[in-house]
């Protein structure tokens, strides 16, 4: 028996299986350090999380915070409901689970933890639009028969309470203070980059602001702190409701981080997501996320089910 306080390494067969599963994720990694080598050994936290399931012979659960709602900016998106970007992204995630099942028989599933209600007031998206987005995500999963995916949102945590009350409760119980975030930014480049990225998104997405450019910047910087606070709080809630999971992230992550950044679709900007953009299809060359105003300059609009879906060239 090993001495108290030591960690027993996983059995060789468990370690090989965990490495095989992680190897399926690595080609889709969204990284803050893409120039550095990224062997499976550089991700001990993910290997540990995977081993918790594999050693028990249980289905692996991945949790992915994201898919909150569409950006309120008509320059970026086609509307407030999921479109081809979400359809392709969810299909990719389901296929990833299928691939895991080919190297580990119990397979995997992904809980898409839709976080729109957590900070809807801060990003100026009305709650009915967020409800409609999340409901359509669930309907899309059912229509496409993506049986390895499910949607988890604030309604699963706090039921039918008014959304402002839900947000206040989550913030009070779980959010770090602004002072704590500022201190973290001073010592951690990743947190600072996240803050700057969210500030940029908020600046681009704000519609109808009547003040000066500098006033808008101040307002977006203030709201960016709130978005990070609520995002951290949502992460704590996910951990409470899914205490055993392999945590994925739509944000770029460095090697060795507790979360594994995953890329859903190709995009020129590593921060671009399906809910901040639309999709351009170049036949023979694939799909790419980009702003609506850029896609419509080079492609024509395609409808799916009577709704705007994506753009195609040619």
Image (tube, rainbow, N blue to C red):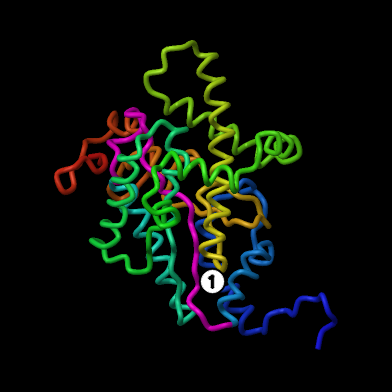
Specify whether residue 80 is painted magenta.
yes
Q: Is residue 252 left or right of residue 82?
A: right
Q: Residue at x 60, y 56 (%)?
A: 259
Residue 244, by quadrant, is bottom right
Residue 94, by quadrant, is bottom left
Q: Residue at x 57, y 27 (%)?
A: 222
* Coordinates of residue 213 in the picture (x, y in percent): 50, 13
Read off the magenta span.
Answer: 56-82
Q: Is residue 32 left or right of residue 147?
A: right
Specify whether residue 74 is painted magenta.
yes
Q: Is residue 123 left or right of residue 49?
A: left
* Coordinates of residue 181 in the picture (x, y in percent): 67, 38
Quarter holding the N terminus?
A: bottom right
Predominant SS of the magenta segment: loop
Residue marked by disc 1: 21
* Coordinates of residue 88 in the picture (x, y in percent): 33, 54
Estimate how packed mark 1 is, as few (under 14), some (14 to 19) or many (20 or more) residues with alpha carbons within 10 Å: many
Q: SS of the residue at dot 1?
A: helix
């Amino acid at each position: 028996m090993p001495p108290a306080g030591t960690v027993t390494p996983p059995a060789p067969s468990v370690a090989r299986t965990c490495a095989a599963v992680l190897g399926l994720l690595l080609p889709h990694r969204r990284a803050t350090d893409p120039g550095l080598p990224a062997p499976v050994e550089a991700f001990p936290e993910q290997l540990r999380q995977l081993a918790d399931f594999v050693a028990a012979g249980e289905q692996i659960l991945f949790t992915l915070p994201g898919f909150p709602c569409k950006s309120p900016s008509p320059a970026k998106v086609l509307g407030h409901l999921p479109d081809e970007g979400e359809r392709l992204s969810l299909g990719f995630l389901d296929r990833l689970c299928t691939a895991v099942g080919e190297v580990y028989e119990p397979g995997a599933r992904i809980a898409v933890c839709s976080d729109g209600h957590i900070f809807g007031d801060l990003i100026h998206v009305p709650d009915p639009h967020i409800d409609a987005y999340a409901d359509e995500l669930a309907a899309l999963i059912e229509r496409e028969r993506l049986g390895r995916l499910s949607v988890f949102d604030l309604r699963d945590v706090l039921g039918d309470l008014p959304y402002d009350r839900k947000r206040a409760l989550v913030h009070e119980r779980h959010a770090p203070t602004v002072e704590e975030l500022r201190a973290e930014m001073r010592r951690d480049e990743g947190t600072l980059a996240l803050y700057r990225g969210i500030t940029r998104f908020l600046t681009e997405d704000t519609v109808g602001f009547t003040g000066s450019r500098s006033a808008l910047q101040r307002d977006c910087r203030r709201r960016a702190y709130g978005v990070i606070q609520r995002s951290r709080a949502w992460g704590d809630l996910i951990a409470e409701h899914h205490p055993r999971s392999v945590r994925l992230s739509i944000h770029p992550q460095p090697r060795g981080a507790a979360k594994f950044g995953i890329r859903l679709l190709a995009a020129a900007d590593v921060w671009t997501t399906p809910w901040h953009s639309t999709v351009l299809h170049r036949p023979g060359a694939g799909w790419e996320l980009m702003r609506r105003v850029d896609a419509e300059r080079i492609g024509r609009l395609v409808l799916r089910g009577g709704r705007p879906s994506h753009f195609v060239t040619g």
